Image (spheres, helix red, strand yellow):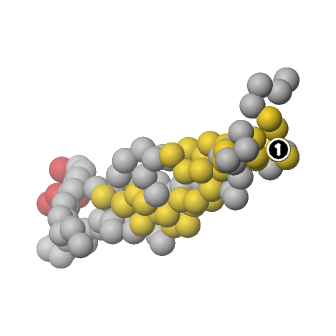
Amino acid sequence: MAKMLRVCLLVVLLSFADARSWTDTKLKLKPLDCPPLSNIPRGTVYVTGTEPGATATYSCDSTHKLHGAKTRTCEFGSWTGDEPICRVHYSCAMDNTFENDHGGYFIGMQ
């Protein structure tokens, strides 16, 4: 399992008046969440969350095959890698036919 590196990003905007009266010395740091993900065309994505270390696992409908990484991880406020795509999946039989969800066809058939 890969090590997770935590990065804290702190942005403080104070006016001069606020700075003179500010007494709270406890900083509250919040990790950068990743944006939510949507299902991909002809497939789905299962997401464990949007916090650092969360994973997104992709799958395609039964008639399609996943092209790209099956899993992405939330790191530093963005998802690793690129979103995969689902492409139609054809299978060829030994008798020179191929099948998909629409039935069988002979090679050379129009």
Amino acid type at mark 1: Gly
Across and down, in percent, residue 12 comes to 22, 54
Between 108 and 91, the one nearer to me in the picture: 108
Q: What residue is rendered at 67% in x and 47% in y?
A: 94
Q: Secondary structure at mark 1?
A: strand
Point out residue 71 in the picture as x, y percentages from the top left corner.
Answer: 43, 60
**The quadrant where residue 75 appears:** bottom left
61 left or right of 53 in image: right
The image quadrant where one finds the C terminus is top right
Residue 92 higher or lower than 38, as above or below: above
Estimate how packed mark 1 is, as few (under 14), some (14 to 19) or many (20 or more) residues with alpha carbons within 10 Å.
Answer: few
| Residue closest to the eye, 98 or 64 | 98
Q: Is residue 100 left or right of residue 4?
A: right
Quarter of the picture holding the N terminus: bottom left
Q: Residue sitting at 17 percent across and 64 percent down?
A: 5
Locate residue 4, reporting x and y percent.
21, 68
For label 1, the residue is: 104
Q: Is residue 51 visible?
A: yes
